[in-house]
Structure formats: structure tokens, C-alpha cells
Image (cartoon, rainbow, N blue to C red):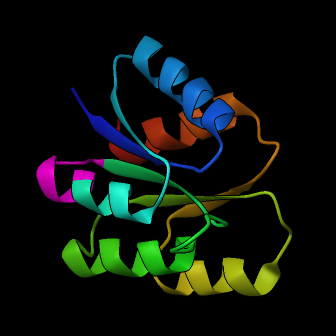
Amino acid sequence: MKKILIVDDQPGIRLLLNELFKKEKYMPHLAANGMEALKIFDEEPIDCVLLDMKIPGMNGIEILEQLKAKNERIPVIMMTAYGEQELIDEAMQLGASRYFTKPFNIFEVLNEVNSILKV
């Protein structure tokens, strides 16, 4: 079973994505902030990360940098509620696979994860 790390400070987004990926036979792991995300990433063999760009404390770019330092091949899909092109460009340069702007179509996110993980 493929493991997905969902990192978002909004409980509703975490819950929605958790339910979606559970139904699709993935094993989601949820983190509300960067410290939780990095702890889970160190303890579990994660296959893909869904990462919010704007998180209090450690932002999405900082989390992305640390994830890529630990495993440069980990696919990371960024999620942002903001059309901040500079941040999006920086995330893509740092190795993000794709980004979605909130509110996103959950089935597009699911299709992207399926495509990345070749399910």
C-alpha cells in the first residue's frame, strides 16, 4: 500500500484528502505543520507528499527543501490558496512535481498522485 504524507494546517483539507486517499487504497499520514511532517517522513517510507505552501511556522518552501535534502526523488505536490507566482516558481525549481491552487478539484489531485505513483 502506497503511503502519502498530507501536510496542511487546515483540518478540513487534511480530513478531505485523508478520506479520498483511504477510499483509493492509499495509506495517508497527516501533518498539521512542518515539524510533524518531517517526523513522519523520518519514520515512514513515504511515496508521495501533498504539501501546503502557506503553513505557520515552517513554510512550504522550507519543508520542501528539507524533504528533498532527505530524499531528492520524493514526489512533492504543492497546494496553495494564493496565486503567488514567485513561491510557485521557487517550489518548482526546488523539485516540486506539480502544484494545485485551492480550491482544487480533488479528482485532479487524485489523478496526479495516481499518475506519479503509477497506480
| Residue at the image position 35 percent from the left and 55 percent from the top | 36
Q: Quadrant of the C terminus?
A: top left
| Residue at the image position 61 percent from the left and 35 percent from the top | 11
> Bounds of the magenta span?
40-47
Instruction: Using the image as rendered, state which of residue 6 and residue 101 is in the foreground.
Output: 6
Identity of the residue furthest to the front in this view: 57
Q: Position of residue 19 (x, y in %)?
A: 52, 18
Residue 113, can we see it?
yes
Residue 95, can we see it?
no
In the displayed structure, 38 sits above or below 85; it is: above
Identity of the residue furthest to the top in this view: 23
| Residue at the image position 65 percent from the left and 36 percent from the top | 13
Instruction: Using the image as rendered, state which of residue 97 and residue 85 is in the foreground.
Output: 85
Q: Is residue 42 magenta?
A: yes
| Residue at the image position 26 percent from the left and 82 percent from the top | 69
45 relative position to 34: left or right:
left
Instruction: Using the image as rendered, state which of residue 105 and residue 29 is in the foreground.
Output: 29
Q: Is residue 108 magenta?
A: no
15 relative position to 42: left or right:
right
Where is residue 90, by image quadrant?
A: bottom right
63 relative position to 13: left or right:
left
